[in-house]
Image (tube, grey):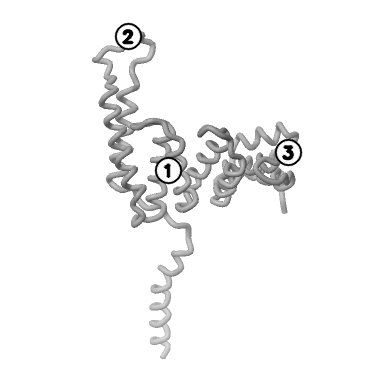
Amino acid sequence: MLIRSLALFCLFAFSAVPAMAQFGKAEPTPKSADEYFAERALRDASRLTAGVSGRDIIKPEDGMDLARAEARMEEALQIYQRLCGDRSAPQDQWARNCFALGDMYRRGMGTVQDYERAKIHYSAACLDGRHSRACLQQAYIAQKGSAGAVDNDQARMLYEAACALNEPGGCAGLGNMMYMGLGGSRNRPRATTLLQDACVADFDWACTRLIEYGLPTRLDRF
């Protein structure tokens, strides 16, 4: 009886490992070959447009090739478009590719600069894909009015989404807007806490804002 009980215990212990593992932090989905290819294409484009510093006239032997660089950026753009649109892939994978695609439209890489298209992909990556950096980037665009008009309501919502995903920059942005009463109600005690937490997380901009507001950069909370 003892042997049987011990055998059952061992069986339970081995079968329980996968179930317990699921409660740990999920590992990011490994990059695909296409993702590595797109990253390499962008590195090639950067190298082909680097030129030679300190020289007024760029010669062919300097290695600059704008046409080839543009072609490489277009290759990367096409890959990110396809990967962003593939919702059958794991969420973190398609979301990071939508973020990369948004970056290309925002910066005008391989295409004309288009903030509206960037917003589409950043928003999808943020709100549907839970990609914190996409939330943060679109929040910056909305707050600065880069797309043509300042939208504090949207910026605050996106900062809040980024903060909920444990992005210190999102918490700092939300805290700053909350302190100033931008895009919603003013709540300075909560704003101070958000800024202090971001400062403790080594987000230097939050530390600077606290100093400018005459607030301590950290407050031990028990």
Instruction: Decide which of 108, 18 is in the foreground and name it.
Output: 108
Residues at discs 2 and 1 in contact (Cβ within 8 Å): no
Q: Position of 23 compared to 168: left or right?
A: left
Q: Mark 3 points at which residue?
A: 216
Instruction: Decide which of 97, 23 is in the foreground and name it.
Output: 97
Residue farthest front in this picture = 148
Q: Position of 167 compared to 191: left or right?
A: left
Residue drawn at 28 percent across, 32 percent down: 72
Q: Which of marks 1 and 3 is nearer the N terminus?
A: 1
Q: As displayed, is residue 173 above or below residue 16?
A: above
Instruction: Decide which of 52, 140 is in the foreground and name it.
Output: 140
Residue farthest bottom in this picture = 1
Instruction: Decide which of 27, 222 is in the foreground and name it.
Output: 27
Q: Earlier in the sequence, mark 3 or mark 2?
A: 2
Q: What quarter of the picture does the N terminus occupy? A: bottom left
Q: Residues within 10 Å of mark 3 (few under 14, many from 20)?
A: few
Q: Residues within 10 Å of mark 2 (few under 14, many from 20)?
A: few
Q: Name the residue under label 1.
A: 99
Report x, y in % for residue 104.
39, 35
Q: Residues within 10 Å of mark 1 (few under 14, many from 20)?
A: many
- Look at label 1 and name its amino acid: Phe
**Residue 178 appears in which quarter of the rendering?**
top right
Residue drawn at 33 percent across, 18 percent down: 51
Q: Name the residue under label 2.
A: 57
Q: Distance between the residues labelled 2 and 1?
A: 36 Å
- Look at label 3 and name its amino acid: Pro
Q: As displayed, is residue 211 above or below residue 155?
A: above
Q: Is mark 1 on a helix, strand or loop?
A: helix
